[in-house]
Amino acid sequence: MLVEQTGEYSAQAKSSWAGLIQQYRVDPAELDPRVFLSANDNWMEFTLRYVVDYKKRRITKDLLFTRILVEIEETKGRVMLASSTFHLVETPEIKVKLVEATKGSTA
């Protein structure tokens, strides 16, 4: 899916980057589209990394995430999205009474 949306530009970027490496002696960069997974006790987070023309960033992101939602829907419930929001108990109101200090006190 990532390659479908970003592959053509990625190939162009690789070619251009190869020229930069020769001309300016910069380090090689990973330009292939990648998916990274982080997991903790509450959820899994997938991060997409891809090279795209800066003028097409928003539309490419929209196309990718729309496609992800379509693919999730096509699993017929085997993959689902879930989210919960919890409202923690609020701090109770605290009343403070200020008392004027009397002469001779060190308060």
Image: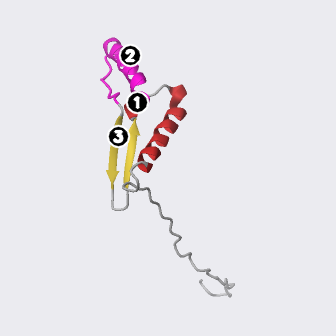
Assess disc 1: are there few (<14), some (14-19) or many (≥20) residues with their C-alpha within 10 Å of its C-alpha: few
| Above or below for 75 versus 18 | below
Q: Is 97 or 76 nearer to us in this picture?
A: 76
Q: Is 31 or 107 nearer to us in this picture?
A: 31
Callout 3 secondary element: strand
Residue 82 placed where, x, y %? Answer: 44, 59
Q: Residue at x 46, y 46 (%)?
A: 69
Instruction: Identify which amino acid the numbered label 1 is placed on.
Output: Glu
Q: Is 25 or 50 nearer to us in this picture?
A: 50
CA distance separating discs 3 and 1: 14 Å
Callout 1 secondary element: helix
CA distance separating discs 2 and 3: 23 Å
Mark 2 vs mark 1, foreground winner is 1
Residue 99 placed where, x, y %? Answer: 67, 85
Q: Residue at x 33, y 58 (%)?
A: 40
Q: Is residue 46 one of those drawn in magenta?
A: no
Q: Which residue in the protein does label 3 denote?
A: 35
| Above or below for 57 versus 13 | below
Q: Residue at x 67, y 83 (%)?
A: 98
Residue 34 placed where, x, y %? Answer: 34, 36
User: Counting residues from the N terminus, which is met first, the one under dot 2 or under dot 3?
Assistant: 2
The part of the chain drawn in magenta is: 4-32
User: Counting residues from the N terminus, which is met first, the one under dot 2 or under dot 1?
Assistant: 1
* Secondary structure mostly seen in the magenta stretch: helix
Mark 3 vs mark 1, foreground winner is 1
Q: Which residue in the protein does label 1 denote?
A: 4
Q: Which residue in the protein does label 2 denote?
A: 16
Residue 29 placed where, x, y %? Answer: 32, 26
Q: Mark 3 touching mark 1, by CB under 8 A?
A: no
Instruction: Identify which amino acid the numbered label 3 is placed on.
Output: Val
Q: Is residue 21 one of those drawn in magenta?
A: yes
Q: Is residue 80 visible from the viewing direction of this image?
A: yes
